Image (tube, rainbow, N blue to C red):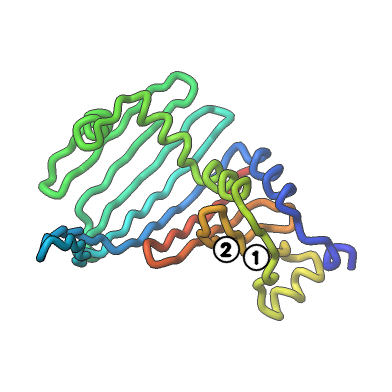
Amino acid sequence: MAYALAEPPSTAQVIRSIDEIHRYNFTRTVTFRQYYMNATNTNNTREVKKTFAYTGKVTATGQVDLDKGVVIEEEKFYVNGSAVMNGHVVVDLKTGEVSGSIKLLDGSEVDVLTFWREYFGLSREQALAMFRENFPLVSLRRILENSEDARMVSEGVSLSTRVLQGLGLEDKTYVYSVKTSSGRMWTLTVDSEGRPLEFVSDDETARVVVEIQPLG
């Protein structure tokens, strides 16, 4: 019964668990609606109109290994459901070496460093810094550190799962609602040790779903 009565992990415990995870697989999906902004002047009145352009989706799968200092990521970009670009990137965090390529809609391939420089104006150093800041668990840690309110909302499991958890045959999970200082809401699912399994945000700008699979 001690297993079933375990206390839910605190936010501090979740952050400690994040710091202890050195290897993990992840998937990240971002779905958004893109708009064009048009400014017009009528009778000395400036108006800005928002016109829908397309629905976009970016999916990424990868592995982070902080012990080896290696990150591998595959990414695809969709417009209105059709794939328009995909890429493969390998980053050595210890040496700063970056390899990989981006395949464009016309079938041509561009070296990833060239792509970052020509399309986003980023040097290798700038791209690496951005890459590090957007690791899934780094992003989640920042969300928790900047949260104004983090509270458990449910254990989010079925009756059959509760029975298995009570018998110690399946790990217990907890679901938290997290509000950041910017007002964005996140739903975070962790296991009984406070290790993140999934975090989700859904508002009028974008839906973000990140799944984490700790390794070892």
Q: Mark 2 points at which residue?
A: 187
Nearer-the-camera pick, 63 or 113: 113
Picture coordinates of residue 56, whole percent (x, y): 27, 60
Residue drawn where x is 71% and y is 52% of the image: 11
Residue drawn where x is 38% and y is 33% of the image: 90
Picture coordinates of residue 118, whole percent (x, y): 19, 32
Given the image, on which type of amino acid does mark 1 rest? Val
Residue at the far bottom in the pictured view: 159
Residue at the far right in the pictured view: 1
Residue drawn where x is 22% and y is 57% of the image: 83
Give the position of the C terminus as an image quadrant. Answer: top right
Given the image, on which type of amino acid does mark 2 rest? Thr
**Disc 1 or 2, which lies upstream in sequence?**
1
Dot 2: element: strand
Marks 1 and 2 in Cβ contact (< 8 Å): yes
- Residue 103, quarter of the rendered image: top left
Residue drawn where x is 63% and y is 41% of the image: 21
Q: Mark 1 points at which residue?
A: 175
Left or right for 84, reference 76: left
Residue 188: image tag: none
Rounded to the nearest angstrom, the CA distance separating label 1 from label 2 is 7 Å
**Vertical relation: 170 (above or below) 147:** below
Dot 1: element: strand
Q: Mark 1 Cα within 10 Å, few/some/many (few <14, many 20+)? A: many
Nearer-the-camera pick, 76 or 19: 19
Residue at the far front in the pictured view: 44
- Residue 188, quarter of the rendered image: bottom right
